[in-house]
Amino acid sequence: MEDMEIDGTEAQPYVLIETGNLPITVGNRPIYTNGRYISKSTPTPLKSTKTGVVYDRRMRYHANIHEDEHHPEDPSRISSIQSMFKAAGCLEKMIPINAREVTKDEVRLVHTDEHWDFVAKTSALSEAQLGKVADDYNSIYVNKETALSARLSCGGVIELCKAVARGDVTNGFANVRPPGHHAEINEPMGFCFFNNVAVAAQCLKRDLKIEKVFILDWDIHHGNGTQKAFYNDPNVVYCSIHRYDNANFYPGDPQAGHTHVGNGPAKGKTINIPWPRPGMRDSDYIYAFNKVVMPIAYEFDPDIVIVSAGFDAAEGDPIGENHVTPAAFGHMTHMLKSLAAGKLVLALEGGYNLDSISNSALACVKVLLGEHPAKLGPIKPSQECVETIYQVIRVQSRYWSCLKPIYIDSAEEKVPGKLVIDIMDMVKLFRTRYLFSKLKMVPAPLAPERLANRFTDLLSSLYNDALFLLFSNDLHCKDVIIFFVHDIADTCATSNLTNLATSYMSDSVYQYIETIINQSYGIVDVDVPPPTNDTQKTDLHDLKDLLIFLWDHFVEYANPKKVVIIGAGRGCRSLMHCINDRDTMIMRFTACVIMVPGNNDPVPTIAKKGDIVNWYYENSLVLLPENHSVWTKKGVKKDSGKCISVKGLNNMSIHDKLHILRQDIIDYFLQRLTDFIPPRQ
């Protein structure tokens, strides 16, 4: 059998194939030419070779000529993948689909005339002019061959999608570059020039009358261009799983948050699954697939599935910093094959570690060819994953009947004849009444009005927001005050249904409050509201202001002899801002500071220099699980406090941690209070 050159061309230039025809190939695969099959060996029926592949060496001509440093979007990305396909014996089982240049008419289905003209004109610019063009736009480079490579990349994806849609092949992989999902209607960005997947989807709708397209984007970056292309289209679902970091990760677009769902009749057709941090793993992606992606895809019932298959979420990628293995990419591909009668196209987007993208792409192609995906370990999603998926379902359940329970926002939804109360409000109300009846804790009023109004908006509470702020009723006459800032009580269910008869509230903080009250100490207890991906920055800023206000008007005003500060969960970072802002008085009266950050929350640090750093290190206790990221660093600095690794805390919720650590924390601060000698008044 003749050996196939990895480009699939035998060094011959590509030509555009006619509609319905398959490209000429070699070896014992079918050869289609002049309307009939020929072969040097035994012909193979078309239906036994189902997976198409697109690759063209001319897409490597697009290269960075303006910087000496290696650019991550390197031409060898696609040749590395193609070589891996060949080495694994996959190419000889695949049907090459010839790339061709996209036409202006096709590009105009997504982009403007001006955008087409801009890309086309780059081939005639001088090197200096090309450098200026690159500087004028967001994260692109340009050379004289960029326009050709971009046209081939986009045209190749179109041809593969059409071949799959027609049934010429069942599925396929488009090994193309430059990528496309960041390219907006009139702007190249993020290494992208034409939005390959978006243009291909529009061509399918126009030319082949495909009615419904499901686009999944598993690139580590949000596909801002693809989302905008279909934000008003009810016949295209765009679902993106991406790193978000509260809009601090590229492209930094707030519309990548989970609350952006589409417009008008297309509401619910945009689904964003925005990870709040790096380091997400196989379990997180498989959990997202099982809970959101596949249920919605089945309900939508698409005619074809197109994946913006970036592999920068893969283990080892220097930009994505996630840890998705080839096995997980294989499993995701396997699940998507169950949709649309198997009509599935994977189009390469990002991915900047050659080994990572090659192995990940190979795992996907093996599944496309009919192999089973490699075995995964136990699926144990992270706490951040579960919280993110919960937030996504809260929003998307309004538009998809497969997502339960349906979330009703009492501030937005009109429910005639019904009283709609957030369960969080019910928890706050019960907790307040219970703590008053048992321990005489009372709500703290919020003033000034500006702060009260800001927290009213933040908490969206049906009742007064003081329900989140409780203090002992005789606080002003206590010599010792505990300033306790923590996440709100857990609500758990004993089944998969939100059934009041099988659900309960777990509040580990009650044990602390009871001990503190029995010791005749005063306490200011602050419940931190749950996070939201879109407003996390604002939440933390408002919380910092609130804690400073409480310190000034409740703790310092009471003039205690000794103070203990305890932070748990989301409150730790804002509590540290309070310590930095009120460092003089806090050092004067505080016997100790105890911090229990969330599993993947950064350890809060002292921002100032001088005495406060040494004081904090000597008087703090920061309790962390063994798998916290801080232990991967060379050394923990003094400004992070006295960090202690505690066995048995890995992946626990804050309230579970507080329950396990209760006696140790109480013993610690009781001893510190005994040893602490307050300054003379």
Image (tube, grey):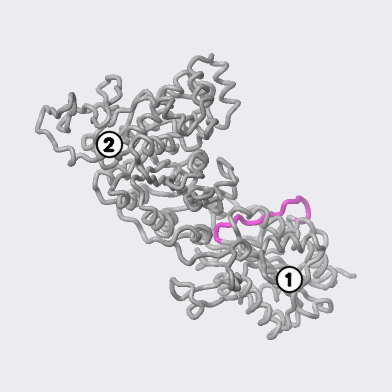
Q: Please give the residue where the numbered disc 1 appears in the rendered image.
A: 466
**Count of labels in the image:** 2
Q: In this view, does 472 lie above or below 53?
A: below
Based on the displayed image, in which of its 4 quarters is residue 446 positioned?
Answer: bottom right
In the picture, the quarter occupied by the N terminus is: top left
Q: Whole-Å distance between the Cαs marked 1 and 2?
A: 62 Å
Residue drawn 55% across the image and 47% down it: 256
Q: Is residue 271 magenta?
A: no
- Percent x, y of residue 536: 63, 55
Classify 10 Å Cα crowding around label 2: few (below 14), some (14-19), many (20 and above).
many
> Which amino acid type is shown beneath numbered disc 1?
Ala
In this view of the protein, which residue sits in the foreground, 644 or 559? 559
- Percent x, y of residue 127: 54, 16
Q: Please give the residue where the numbered disc 2 appears in the rendered image.
A: 52
Based on the displayed image, in which of its 4 quarters is residue 32 positioned?
Answer: top left
> Which amino acid type is shown beneath numbered disc 2?
Gly
Contact (CB < 8 A) between labels 1 and 2?
A: no
The residue furthest front is 416
- Percent x, y of residue 636: 61, 53
Segment colored magenta: 599-612
Q: What element carries label 2?
A: strand
Q: What element carries label 1?
A: helix
The residue furthest left is 42
Q: Does the magenta stretch include residue 602?
A: yes
Q: In the visual, does 579 lie left or right of 149?
A: right
In this view of the protein, which residue sits in the foreground, 269 or 316? 269
In the picture, the quarter occupied by the C terminus is: bottom right
In this view of the protein, which residue sits in the foreground, 495 or 560? 495
Based on the displayed image, in which of its 4 quarters is residue 103 positioned?
Answer: top left
Q: In this view, does 432 lie above or below 222?
A: below
Residue drawn 22% across the image and 28% down it: 4
**Magenta stretch: dominant secondary structure:** loop
